[in-house]
Amino acid sequence: MAGSTKKIFKKGDLLIREGEQGDRAYVLESGSVEILIQRDGALIQIGTRGAGSIIGEMAMIDDRPRTATVRALEDCQVMEISRDDFSHRVDSADPILKMVMRVIMTRYRDMISRSQFVQIPTLSTTAAESTENNDELHKLAVSTIKIHHELKTALERNELVLYYQPIIDLQNMKIAGFEALMRWKHPERGMISPGVFIPVAEESGLIVDLSRWALDVSCDAVKSIRQAANPKLLSTAYPLSVSVNFSVKDFASGNFFNQVQSTLRDKGTDPSYIHLEITESLLMEAPGPAKEALEKCRQLGVSVSIDDFGTGYSSLSYLHFFPIDNLKIDQSFIRSMSKQPSSYMLVKSIIGLAHNMNMKVIAEGIETEEEASTIKGLGCEECQGFWFARPMPLEDALKFVQNWVPTKIA
Ligand code: C2E
Ligand code: CA
Ligand code: CA
């Protein structure tokens, strides 16, 4: 399975045949190819492509016959992208955009069938592709396609891991829990940050599998973390928990609650040991399904945190609408708090607002003792940040729990 998407074409092999139905594209990883069209019974070369190019991409958008033949000029390694891998992107695109894309494709194909090769600028590597913007777009498209493709098998290959960042209770300086943050240990590219692959996973729908996996692993992790802890720690008002990040796509299937419930049951995890985190802007994308699922989760005993609070949706009315236990103040506010009095006032107001609505506040991105001390002074309940610890592998988190000595903040 893992290797099935890479293919080798020998020099002279045809990757694509003009006139055949196309259902796949290729990303050329090494080698080069020539693009040929039939004119008056002869094959004429109209361009060449080198490593990094996408070939046969039109078949990703429509399923009409190929407009050219592509032949390997030397041995080539390609990554194959099937139409199925791509179709959800087209299906989920804005309807107008989809229509415009199809119109452009039809015109482009018509132009190719009517013209002689010298009049086909987009098939050569000059013209449209030569501008910097197009180069950038092209690189971005290739890298997104590659990430999506590799991410599909990353789970099976055990390349994904969760790191855990402690969340500290500011009142007693005990560990309230950990946030589970995903990392991708890529065999060639090293550690890839979630900022790179989570958006691709969200766009493609793969996030649902990733989230399910993260919840599963977090249930095991919270068990080990609680076992590692000093029993006195566990007697606090807050259970030592693990917070798992979810995306709005997770709610789209309508099966979210059942998934959470059955995972917790199968793992024998007390629902109060797991917290869900979801960003406010994502919530606003699908308020109805999200509200229903979150309400059920809360009834089960799983608490819900709004992540990156203050960065997304500007209206506060949604705070009434959704069942929310905690607000996580985004680190951008914490960063500017000590420099700008207005940011300080904003943080103060957010904490007041949350408390008035019976929510707890968790401050993110605490990098200095001063920041910890300031938000503690404002009544913020919990915080996390590099000043306490960076996200770490589970074995380090277990040592962290064993060795943690609650210390006072100045
Ligand atoms: P987030 O949920 O807001 O996670 C907090 C991010 O802030 C983490 O970045 C963490 O490493 C970083 N951070 C924590 N303390 C500090 C600090 O003191 N200073 C600074 N500068 N940064 C700090 P990370 O791990 O790179 O994750 C980035 C984002 O990726 C997360 O933001 C979250 O939105 C997303 N993400 C991570 N794991 C998952 C996951 O399992 N599922 C989903 N859906 N999203 C995830
Ligand atoms: Ca989070
Ligand atoms: Ca956050």
Image (cartoon, rainbow, N blue to C red):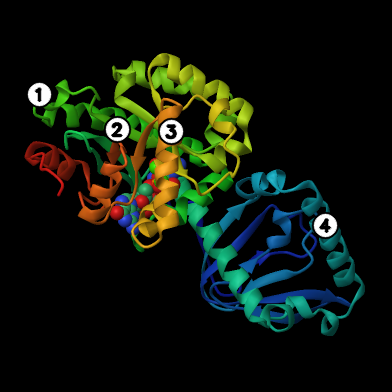
Single out the mark in the foreground, 1 or 3: 3
Label 2 to label 3: alpha-carbon separation: 21 Å
Disc 1: which residue: 231
Furthest-right residue in this view? 114
Q: Residue at x 34, y 47 (%)?
A: 364
Amino acid type of the residue tagged 4 in the rendering = Val
Disc 4: which residue: 100
Single out the mark in the foreground, 3 or 4: 3
Q: Mark 4 or mark 1, which is nearer the start of the sequence?
A: 4
Label 1 to label 4: alpha-carbon separation: 62 Å
Say if mark 1 contacts mark 4, CB within 8 Å. Answer: no
Left or right relative to 378: residue 227 = left
> Quick one: SS at disc 4?
helix
Q: Mark 3 or mark 2, which is nearer the start of the sequence?
A: 2
Residue 292, given in percent of the width and then of the height, sits at 56, 21
Say if mark 1 contacts mark 2, CB within 8 Å. Answer: no
Amino acid type of the residue tagged 3 in the rendering = Ala
Residue 256, given in percent of the width and then of the height, sits at 51, 25
Label 1 to label 3: alpha-carbon separation: 31 Å
Single out the mark in the foreground, 2 or 3: 3
State the mark number for residue 126: none
User: Within the image, what quadrant is residue 314 found in?
Assistant: top right
